[in-house]
């Protein structure tokens, strides 16, 4: 199989995404992860643009990468005749790397209107910079900025910039769709024209401003490029860069190219999640191949289809990219989803289907009241357990009362002082009734604390359980403050995590239901 | 310019996205918004699959759509010889619509392995269902499920299903990439083969499992389809459907096709945000064309480039899709924003800029505490008014207390009985202090009622004011029930509507702040 070189720029172009701010330690960890995934080139940063990236390249010397070569990024020299004293170029030669990427303008109007220089001097900037870095013994990638827009505006000048870089010794010419607005139809002829220039290898670097970054990359590969640049999860400025998590499996599983080993491809989902964690971004569940929903099925028709033929509603086997099939339970789903999920949890239904049908009706009824089980598998499991006549709950609520007070203060937006939230909870455990009270930072927090305080007397091993996430959704928004409210809670004991749901027109009750389910679920799972 | 018919399935296929659960009211509002945007066909739901969709089609009869035709979705008949008594088909003819979409299998292995029927009977199911619905005088779209995978497996059978639907009178054959794994190279020849069959119009329906839904749709248009199905924001099962917010502007601005009027296209960003709000999903800022970051630029090279040439770093003029250039907030651009917004509201600041700077500091402080004024212009206006030394608020809070009780009931998910919510509010109006109490359906509703009860004694013209919308967002999700909470409220007096914001770690206080702002704003605007 022909192979395609993968070049990751998550640490440089990806870090331009609004909201991302990697520390040096994050960057080192991500580089390690990318190396483990089998990426060939990792662009670590732009040492000429900020001190954090200089520090990264210093510390990266001890990284001991197995598969990857680290690359430093920079722009062409500025003042004529001063290549070796150009601060940007010096930062590259001082970065301690074997490969560098140098960006230059490939568009005539960009050179004259934005760089405000002559077309000739722009060519000299490219030639001088590439030649100097080659003399220093470095592998040099030339990023042809605005190549595709430049090709439309003045094709011969755009190609001339590539020739100049080639003559100066560049190892690879990377054609950039910098503004991200090109169509696949425009990519193909421009890549073919570039390939005609000579034998030097051609690369592609696209942005997603028309939601075509992946398609444009694949079109470029079809047209003969052998080097692909992108980022994990498609992170990047504006609408993002080409998403390697989509490109790599498509090239490998659908188009017959070689990028990673099978075992490495199996780590793709893990790498995607790892990097979204490092970026402190909630993983996008709808990401192709690697998202939590990518192989999730809600419709009953689809689930019963999948049971007959695993290829019926999924385009690849999710295991190949380290992901998995997920069956969701909702009002849109049929009996087969319920039976499937129940089986996964170790529950068997009598074959007549009566019990499953009853449970489906119950799910539909509860969903019409605002519960939603596709994200709350722990509440769903409790629903199954409670349907059994011999189910013994580990605790039962007798009653609760929550008081929220605001005293002696004119209405101001400036602080939350003067607020008091207190919850009184009475629960029964076996034959004993315990009555506790706790204050909290808001009424739900007070309720949470009071319930734990009550239960810890009986179940001290509950102590490490933490609420990781608390979400509120208003369901019927047009009815104002009388709306139905759904609360979703994610909990963790440090090893596992689980999700529960509560719904009511009363936010306190909805929160109570989700809180109580969270603790009940854990207690049931860890019964001696 | 050749025109392309746009068919939106946000309300049916889009609603399959994990986490989306539209109410009937949401669906009606979204249909209105899509109509306003100029969408030609709106698929409202699958009345044969759930009661919510039956209710939607009943209520939709009074929608008075101007541009759009409402479509009901269903599957082909099941038992032989029983078309008119098939529940799915009956639900379609009872939906009160002029157009229906009927889905049938176009893949031989899907028919035999999943539907578990013969190839011949599958053709009969398609023919019988289409013919019957045509006899009822309906426009019939035939969704050829799994067409592209079917074309790969057995091209002549896949084409045969299209012929059968055509012979039975289908008005449009919609080729579906149901599993979303096809490549543009595979779409083109299959569409061309389908076009050779006859004169009936061909449509395309793609999914995004390989991040190619938009590219596959565009490839199909290039190959001759005249009807495009997709969803707003690309919502949909697994990795989503083809994103109309990317497809429409690309077809229109880059490929020369006609879809919407210029004025309608200018509402695209607004429609995208409206529908993400209705879905209660945080708008994805990196969405092409319509995302908040789509034309966002960090200070530096790109910003100075843009000042020299607006086309230097953006692929289209954002105004065309109702979006805008965003230069990431510097202290200076922040101040000019505030001055601009204040001027719009009729406030003038002294030219020395002191007052504007103070206000900017205050906004920054409040935003760091979770307030957000982009969508809460009424709270922003109150902020401006309160900054004036002579501001007289129409009422002031002295204190409040809210009690929520749940009594004598084991924890159950089945109803909200046994809940009591009561709010006691003390407010000062001029020199008078009034102390009221009210019960409500939840603590916020109780607070709302008590406050109105107190104020109505002084301001009886407050009576028609209604809360239209109440939204809750948890800001720091990882800190569990102690999280910062933001409440956004939309109010209306039947003529105007306005939005206010409150933020606190205490949801009751956050709600109070937004509620109080809502009434204070109206009273200030309507002072005699």
Image (cartoon, coloured by chain):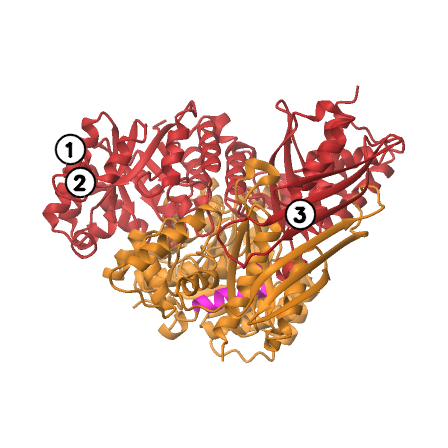
Chain colours: A orange, B red
- Please say if the residues under marks 1 and 3 sit with CB atoms less than 8 Å apart: no
Q: Element under label 3? A: strand
Q: Element under label 2? A: helix
Say which residue label 1 marks.
B168
| Image location (x, y in percent) of residue A274 | 52, 68
A112 lies left or right of A144: right
Residue A463 drawn in magenta: no
| Image location (x, y in percent) of residue B317 | 55, 35
Whole-number angstrom distance, CA of label 2 to CA of label 3: 51 Å
Q: Nearer the viewer, residue B500 or A456?
A: A456
Q: Are marks 2 and 3 on the same chain?
A: yes
Residue that appears at 48% across and 59% down: A376
Chain for numbered disc 3: B
Chain for numbered disc 1: B
In this rendering, does residue B409 appear at all? yes
Magenta segment, which residues?
A268-282
Q: Element under label 1? A: loop
| Image location (x, y in percent) of residue A352 | 24, 60
Q: Residue furthest top?
A: B528
Say which residue label 3 marks.
B486
Q: Counting residues from the N terminus, which is met first, the one under dot 2 or under dot 1?
A: 2
């Amino acid at each position: 199989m022909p192979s395609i070189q993968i070049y990751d720029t998550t640490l440089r172009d990806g870090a331009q995404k609004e909201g991302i701010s990697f520390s040096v330690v994050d960057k080192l960890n991500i580089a390690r992860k990318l190396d483990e995934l089998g990426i060939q080139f990792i662009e670590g940063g732009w040492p000429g643009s900020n001190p954090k990236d200089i520090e990264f390249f210093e510390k990266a010397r001890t990284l001991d990468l197995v598969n990857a070569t680290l690359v430093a990024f920079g722009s062409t020299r500025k003042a004529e005749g001063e290549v070796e004293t150009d601060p940007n170029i010096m930062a590259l030669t001082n970065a301690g790397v074997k490969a560098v990427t140098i960006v230059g303008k490939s568009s005539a109007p960009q050179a004259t209107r934005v760089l405000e220089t002559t077309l000739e001097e722009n060519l000299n900037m490219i030639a001088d910079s590439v030649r100097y870095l080659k003399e220093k013994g470095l592998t040099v990638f030339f990023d042809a900025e605005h190549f595709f827009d430049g090709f439309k505006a003045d094709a011969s000048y755009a190609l001339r910039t590539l020739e100049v870089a080639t003559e100066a010794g560049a190892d690879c010419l990377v054609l950039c769709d910098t503004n991200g607005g090109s169509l696949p139809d425009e990519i193909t002829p421009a890549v073919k024209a570039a390939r005609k220039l000579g034998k030097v290898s051609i690369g592609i670097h696209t942005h997603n401003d028309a939601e075509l970054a992946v398609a444009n990359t694949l079109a470029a590969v079809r047209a003969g490029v052998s080097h692909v640049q992108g980022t994990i999860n498609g992170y990047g400025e504006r609408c993002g860069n080409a998403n390697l998590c989509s490109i790599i499996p498509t090239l490998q599983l659908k188009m017959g190219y070689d990028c990673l080993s099978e075992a490495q491809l199996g780590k793709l989902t893990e790498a995607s999640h790892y990097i979204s964690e490092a970026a402190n971004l909630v993983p996008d569940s709808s990401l192709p191949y690697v998202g939590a929903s990518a192989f999730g099925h809600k419709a009953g028709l689809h689930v019963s289809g999948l049971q007959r033929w695993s290829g019926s509603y999924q385009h690849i086997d999710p295991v190949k990219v380290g992901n998995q099939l997920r069956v969701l339970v909702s009002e849109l789903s049929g009996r087969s989803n319920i039976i499937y999920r129940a089986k996964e949890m170790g529950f068997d239904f009598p074959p007549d289907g009566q019990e499953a049908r009853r449970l489906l009706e119950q799910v539909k009824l509860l969903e019409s009241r605002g519960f939603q089980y596709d994200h709350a598998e722990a509440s769903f499991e409790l629903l199954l357990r409670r349907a059994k006549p011999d189910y013994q709950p580990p605790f039962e609520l007798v009653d609760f009362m929550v008081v929220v007070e605001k005293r002696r203060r004119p209405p101001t937006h400036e602080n939350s002082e003067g607020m008091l939230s207190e919850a009184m909870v009475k629960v029964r455990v076996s034959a004993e009734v315990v009555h506790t009270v706790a204050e909290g930072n808001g009424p739900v927090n007070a309720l949470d604390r009071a319930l734990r305080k009550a239960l810890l007397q009986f179940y001290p091993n509950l102590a490490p359980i933490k609420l990781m996430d608390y979400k509120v959704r208003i369901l019927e928004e047009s009815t104002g403050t009388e709306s139905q409210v759904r609360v979703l809670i994610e909990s963790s004991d440090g090893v596992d995590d689980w999700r529960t749901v509560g719904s009511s027109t009363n936010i306190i009750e909805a929160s109570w239901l989700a809180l109580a389910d969270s603790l009940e679920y854990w207690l049931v799972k860890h019964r001696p």
